[in-house]
Image (spheres, rainbow, N blue to C red):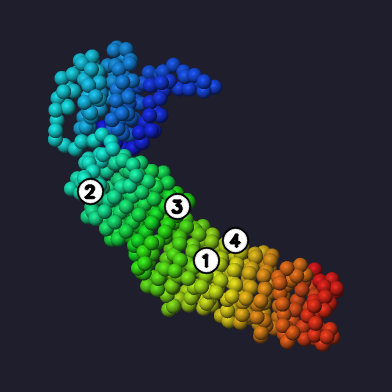
């Protein structure tokens, strides 16, 4: 006869469920209400499996009491289940007694209400199997001995320093939840208010499966997430790393749509896994400099590696159409492929690591301030380039897609550059052009354009 809470709903959600039976639904024009509907046993059982909130239970029983006595008999199981191992207030119990007496099972209800042993669902705002203590912590002995914890109090829920937590933690009205120094190894589901923030601090043990599908922001102060094999998050979940300590080992961030590791010490990390289409920000992060670092960006939508030393990477690839910012990055790996990027920033970078750099196909490229360029710079595959303040020393050949691309690139070649310049189908040696045009770069470019370069 005991009905446990298996699909928790907030008091407001239950109130909405009861509206047709308490007041009647609004008319189509919303100017009046339709006649009240008779409540059914199925609706009542759904409510009992969703809450034990005192007001909701009271309203449900009042709806039953408004029915003719001949119809109330079918609610015997509902009435008894409302008090079986459930804590109820005296006002709710009074309504239940009246219904039971009318139905001829008053003695059975009294017997059920006299039971004191076993676990009891409590009226909210309390734990389902325990109450808050005076220091705003949950009763540790109770919490560590149950499989499901339900608390409908609002605001913050502190779950700190527990050696064991229930498999299910349901906190539907809590906007912030703190897990500090607790063991989460047995936890399978944590449900908070929609859009809640959840904080993990000094968590030593993690479960293999973790459902945080209602959370909007995750704050982490931890080191290793690899024990978690299956994360469940909405697509727009944000993750913030608040620890000043370094991460180490294999770090699994495949749950997160956005990852911010700006300025973090990652020197002890051997591998980081990212989610498909993730937005990853590693601006000025300290990466390992010895080869062997596994960090796959080939499926990330956005990657920021501003100011990073990439010496530890064996390979650097990007997803098709990806946005990549590597401003001031150094020590690019030999296996670097920019060809799939949609937008690429290499501003103020040294490109001495490239014998031949392959730039994005139909992508936008910003090389402003770049130096140590390869001997051949081919921009013909790019839709747009920015070459402002580039240093062209040692470059032997520069290829532009067409005249418009060159004009819009803000390029400025030095007078002593003896490079071959290709603009569309036009090719000229810069040194020869300067000899015949008084060393004027403007005249040289004008000469090419006048020939009909595209």
Check if mark 4's residue and mark 2's residue have beta carbons within 8 Å.
no
Residue 310, can we see it? yes
Q: Position of residue 29 (x, y in %)?
A: 54, 22
- Quadrant of the drawing holding the N terminus: top left
Inter-mark Cα distance, 1 to 3: 19 Å
Q: Mark 3 or mark 2: which is in front?
A: 2
What residue is rendered at 84% in x and 71% in y? Answer: 452
**Mark 2 highlights which residue?**
135
State how far apart marks 4 and 3 are (Cα): 22 Å
Q: Which residue is mark 3?
A: 237
Horizontally, residue 145 falls left or right of residue 211, namely: left
Mark positioned earlier in the residue sequence (3 or 2)? 2
| Residue density around tag 4, few if under 14, some if 14–19, many if 20 or more, within 10 Å | some
Q: Which mark is residue 190?
A: none
Q: Secondary structure at mark 4?
A: loop
**Helix, strand or loop for disc 3:** loop
The answer to which quarter of the image holds residue 105 is: top left
| In front: label 4 or label 2 | 2
User: Residue 308, position in %: x, y?
Assistant: 49, 73
Residue found 42% across the figure and 75% down from its top: 288
Which residue in the structure is indicated by mark 4?
A: 321
Mark 1 vs 3: CB contact within 8 A: no
Q: Nearer the viewer, residue 418 or 58?
A: 58
In terms of secondary structure, where does tag 1 sit? Answer: strand
Q: Earlier in the sequence, mark 1 or mark 3?
A: 3
- Disc 1 designates what residue? 304
Image position of 153 with respect to 396: above or below: above
Q: Residues within 10 Å of mark 1 (few under 14, many from 20)?
A: many
Q: For the C terminus, which image quadrant?
A: bottom right
């Amino acid at each position: 006869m005991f009905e446990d809470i298996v699909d928790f709903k907030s008091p407001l959600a239950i109130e909405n469920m009861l509206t047709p039976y308490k007041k009647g639904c609004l008319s189509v024009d919303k100017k009046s209400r339709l006649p009240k509907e008779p409540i059914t046993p199925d609706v009542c059982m759904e409510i009992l499996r969703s809450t034990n909130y005192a007001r909701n239970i009271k309203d449900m029983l009042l709806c039953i009491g408004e029915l003719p006595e001949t119809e109330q008999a079918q609610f015997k199981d509902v009435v008894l289940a409302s008090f079986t191992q459930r804590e109820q207030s005296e006002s709710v119990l009074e309504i239940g007694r009246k219904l039971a007496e009318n139905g001829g099972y008053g003695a059975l209800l009294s017997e059920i209400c006299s039971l004191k042993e076993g676990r009891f669902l409590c009226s909210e705002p309390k734990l389902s199997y325990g109450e808050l203590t005076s220091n705003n912590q949950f009763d540790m002995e109770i919490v560590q001995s149950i499989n499901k914890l339900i608390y409908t109090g609002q605001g913050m829920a502190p779950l700190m320093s527990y050696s064991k937590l229930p498999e299910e933690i349901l906190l539907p009205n809590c906007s912030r939840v703190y897990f500090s120094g607790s063991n989460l190894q047995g936890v399978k589901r944590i449900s908070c208010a929609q859009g809640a923030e959840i904080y993990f601090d000094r968590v030593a043990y993690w479960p293999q499966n973790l459902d945080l599908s209602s959370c909007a922001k995750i704050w982490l102060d931890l080191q290793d997430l690899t024990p978690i094999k299956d994360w469940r998050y909405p697509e727009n979940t944000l993750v913030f790393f608040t620890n000043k300590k370094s991460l180490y080992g294999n770090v699994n961030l495949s749950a997160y749509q956005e990852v911010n590791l700006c300025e973090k010490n990652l020197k002890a990390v051997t591998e980081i896994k990212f989610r498909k289409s993730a937005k990853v920000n590693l601006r000025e992060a300290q990466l390992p400099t010895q080869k062997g670092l596994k960090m796959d960006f080939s499926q990330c939508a956005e990657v920021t590696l501003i100011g990073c030393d990439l010496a530890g990477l064996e390979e650097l690839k990007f997803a098709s159409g990806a946005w990549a910012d590597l401003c001031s990055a150094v020590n690019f790996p030999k296996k670097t492929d920019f060809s799939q990027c949609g937008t690429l920033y290499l501003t103020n970078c040294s490109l001495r690591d490239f014998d031949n750099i392959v730039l994005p196909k139909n992508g936008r490229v910003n090389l402003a301030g770049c130096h140590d360029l390869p001997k051949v710079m081919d921009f013909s595959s790019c839709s747009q380039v920015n070459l402002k303040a580039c240093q062209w020393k040692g470059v032997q050949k520069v290829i532009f897609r067409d005249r418009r691309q060159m004009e819009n690139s803000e390029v400025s070649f030095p007078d002593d550059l003896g490079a071959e310049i290709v603009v569309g189908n036009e090719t000229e040696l810069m040194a020869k052009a300067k000899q015949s045009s008084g060393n004027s770069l403007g005249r040289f470019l004008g000469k090419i354009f006048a020939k009909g370069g595209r």
